[in-house]
Every structure is written in structure tokens, then in C-alpha cells.
């Protein structure tokens, strides 16, 4: 029997041919919801995976996934934002070997601003307060993050300005951001799917994206497509 409210960990030492005995991560750390999306491995070997419960944080492992613990919480108090849940992270080596950046579904005083970025400089032990991403406009929905080899940050989410339910989640878009001092500036955007669309997952390098969508309904199918390479603007 599988309890899908719990998170389990299994490890393979032979490329997936065999697996060890499952370990219940939820019982060890309390109830958390991972991602959705992949985690990262830092230069130090640390594994980090974004999770959310009462707030957002990262699960950390320094022994190849044998044991895990929770890192510091993203501090929402005083940010003007409220955590909405799903999050994903990537490493950000341009800032340092222990730098992480997390893309978080949030809510704000502006109905069109529902995504934020938070940064960690100590491999997930602590986080700076989250900052809304005004370039990403649309309904509250999970979003995804990737990082190209040149340091460009890619974000994906439905892009429906002044959205209205039930036709709220549509027009899946990928934005490219480049660091501009202490913040990030939009360097391009590409429409991936103009119809109904919802949750998405970028590969770590941002070259492919998998998302929910379809011509008639946002959960009609699962679609995988390539993300346009290079610098791009709205298509």
C-alpha cells in the first residue's frame, strides 16, 4: 500500500537496476510537499530539494540521500507576500558555490503578481525574504525554474494578464531573466502554448519543458516540448 500524503526515498547504486529498502522521509521530518520539480546537487555534494508546508524551505542531504533534514524557512513576514505553496529551486553558481534560487507560488496585493524568487547563499540553511517577479503576470499557479549554462534564469507559468476564472490558466510562457545588480531583469519571453495550460516543469538546464495542457482543457494531456534556445522575445 502507498500513502501518497507521505514522501518516500529509495536509492539505487546501479543506475536503477535495483533499489534499496524505502525510507519514509515524512515520518523523519514531518509533513512536507516536494516541488513539483527536480532538485539539485551542489559542488560540495549537497542535495537540495524545494518543499512546502506551512512555509517554503529545502530538504538537504549531505550523504548522498541516505539522510535528509529541513533547511531554514523562507521568511515571508514583512515581505508583503503570502506563501501559496509549490516551489522549485536551481543552483546559481554565478553568485557562489552554495547559492540557490527558489521560484515560489505566492499571493500578493496585486492579483496579477503570484510568483516570487528567494535566494540562499548558504546552500539552503537560510533564505533572503522573497521578492515578487512583476514580469510573470497571471493567475495563481505552480511555476518552474531552470538555469542555462550562461547563468540565464528561466521561469515558466501560465501568462494570462487580468485573468478570470474558469479560463484563468492558459498561455504557458517561459521568461528569461538576467541578473541586474541585486535583482533580475527580463531579457526575453516565449509563448510555449497559447491554449489552456497549468503546471509545468523545466529541465534544470531549461532546454525542455513538460506541462499540463490541451486545446480544450488545462488538464487534458501532458505535453513535452523544446524551449526556444538563445535570447528570444514574445512569439
Image (cartoon, grey):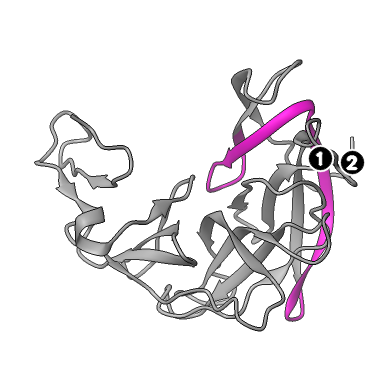
Judged from the image, the secondary structure of the residue bearing numbered disc 2 is loop
Identify the residue at image location x=26%, y=63%. Answer: 29
Q: Total marks drawn?
A: 2
**In the image, residue 102 lies in the stretch drawn in magenta:** no
Outermost residue on the front side: it is 165
- Residue 14's spot in the image, x, y percent? 16, 36
Which one is nearer the viewer's eye here, 190 or 52?
52
Which residue is at the front of the view, 216 or 231? 216
Quadrant of the rendered structure where residue 50 is?
A: bottom left
Question: Where does residue 110 sit, x and y in percent of width and height?
Answer: 83, 62
Quarter of the picture containing the N terminus is top left
Residue at image point 28% right, 61% down: 30
Q: Which mark is residue 234?
A: 2
Q: Distance from label 2 to label 1 (Cα)? A: 5 Å
Position of residue 91 measured from the top left corner of the image (x, y, whole percent):
51, 63
Q: Residue 93 placed where, x, y %?
A: 53, 69
Q: Give the range drawn in magenta.
A: 180-209
**Residue of label 1:** 190
Give the left or right position of residue 197, taking residue 223 as reference. Answer: right
Q: Main secondary structure of the magenta part?
A: strand
Q: Are marks 2 and 1 in contact (CB under 8 Å)?
A: yes
Amino acid at each position: 500500500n502507498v500513502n501518497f500524503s507521505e514522501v518516500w526515498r529509495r536509492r539505487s547504486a546501479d543506475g536503477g537496476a535495483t533499489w534499496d529498502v524505502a525510507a519514509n522521509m515524512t515520518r523523519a521530518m514531518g509533513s512536507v510537499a516536494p516541488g513539483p520539480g527536480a532538485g539539485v546537487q551542489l559542488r560540495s555534494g549537497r542535495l537540495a530539494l524545494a518543499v512546502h508546508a506551512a512555509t517554503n524551505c529545502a530538504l538537504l542531504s549531505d550523504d548522498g540521500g541516505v539522510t535528509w533534514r529541513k533547511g531554514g524557512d523562507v521568511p515571508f513576514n514583512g515581505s508583503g507576500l503570502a506563501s501559496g505553496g509549490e516551489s522549485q529551486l536551481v543552483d546559481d553558481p554565478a553568485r557562489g558555490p552554495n547559492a540557490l534560487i527558489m521560484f515560489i507560488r505566492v499571493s500578493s496585493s496585486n492579483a496579477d503578481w503570484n510568483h516570487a524568487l528567494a535566494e540562499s547563499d548558504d546552500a539552503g540553511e537560510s533564505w533572503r525574504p522573497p521578492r515578487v517577479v512583476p514580469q510573470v503576470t497571471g493567475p495563481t499557479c505552480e511555476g518552474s525554474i531552470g538555469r542555462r549554462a550562461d547563468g540565464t534564469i528561466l521561469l515558466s507559468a501560465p501568462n494570462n494578464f487580468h485573468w478570470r476564472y474558469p479560463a484563468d490558466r492558459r498561455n504557458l510562457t517561459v521568461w528569461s531573466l538576467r541578473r541586474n545588480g541585486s535583482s533580475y531583469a527580463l531579457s526575453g519571453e516565449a509563448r510555449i502554448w497559447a491554449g489552456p495550460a497549468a503546471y509545468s516543469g523545466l529541465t534544470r538546464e531549461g532546454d525542455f519543458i513538460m506541462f499540463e495542457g490541451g486545446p480544450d482543457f488545462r488538464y487534458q494531456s501532458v505535453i513535452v516540448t523544446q524551449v526556444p534556445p538563445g535570447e528570444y522575445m514574445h512569439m
